Amino acid sequence: MRNDASALACAAAMLGGEGLIQRYQREIETISETSIFLIDDDYSPALLKRPKSGHFRVQSDHGGSVERIFPSAAVIAAARRIAADCPGELLYARVDAIVRGGELLLKEVERVEPELFFAYCPEAAAHLANALIDKLS
């Protein structure tokens, strides 16, 4: 069995020094993953992403499912604080976390997102378009 430093060094070598390594959080299997979207620091939709039974990957390509949710004001405020700590100007961010007992446990912050999940919250597309127009004006 490897220690954490040895495992990280091995993973870094496999990735050629480029990549992202996340600590495995077992709650992903039971609580699932919450994604909170922020556009120009405004709350946009939030989604609960569940892995299929017996798995940990939440992406639909791997059998996961997605549903729109409405997190508490405290969870949204925590996501905003996390995004505010990121460098640079925020137009868009997705805060991925486990929400356990009303507390947000950060997994990652995405600032470049290939999947915006507009099918689950069509009004978010207009929200993002308007934020872009405001920034470009």
Image (spheres, grey):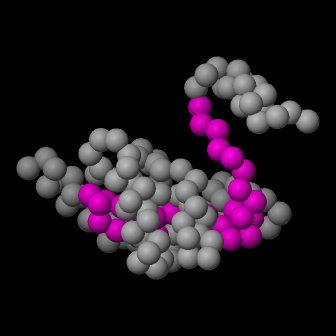
The residue sitting at 76% across, 36% down in the picture is 4
Say whether residue 136 is visible. Answer: yes
Point out residue 121 in the picture as x, y percentages from the top left corner: 40, 71
Give the quarter of the figure containing the N terminus: top right
Residue at image point 61% right, 64% down: 98
Instruction: Name the residue nearer the viewer: 111 or 65.
Output: 111
Q: Nearer the viewer, residue 6 or 89?
A: 6
Residue shown at the point (14%, 55%) measured from the top left: 134
* Range covered by the magenta-colored residues: 19-46
At x 63%, y 56%, the residue is: 59
Is residue 67 positioned above or below 117 on the image? below
Single out the residue that lies furthest toward the left.
137
Q: Is residue 42 magenta?
A: yes
Of residue 78 and residue 39, the one placed in the foreground of this image is 78
Please name whichever residue, 60 or 40, is drawn nearer the observer in this view of the structure: 40
The outermost residue toward the right is 1
> Which quarter of the figure has residue 50?
bottom right
Q: Is residue 86 left or right of residue 28?
A: left
Would you say 3 lies left or right of 137 here? right
Q: Is residue 119 above or below residue 20?
A: below
Q: Position of residue 93 (x, y in %)?
A: 39, 53
Above or below — where is 109 with respect to 130?
A: above
Instruction: Locate residue 54, reporting x and y percent.
Output: 83, 63
| Magenta stretch encompasses residue 5 | no
What percent of the width, then of the height, locates residue 12? Answer: 67, 26
Count of numbered labels shown in the rendering:
0
Determine the image quadrant of residue 34: bottom right
Residue 120 appears in the picture as rendered: no
Q: Is residue 129 above or below residue 47?
A: above
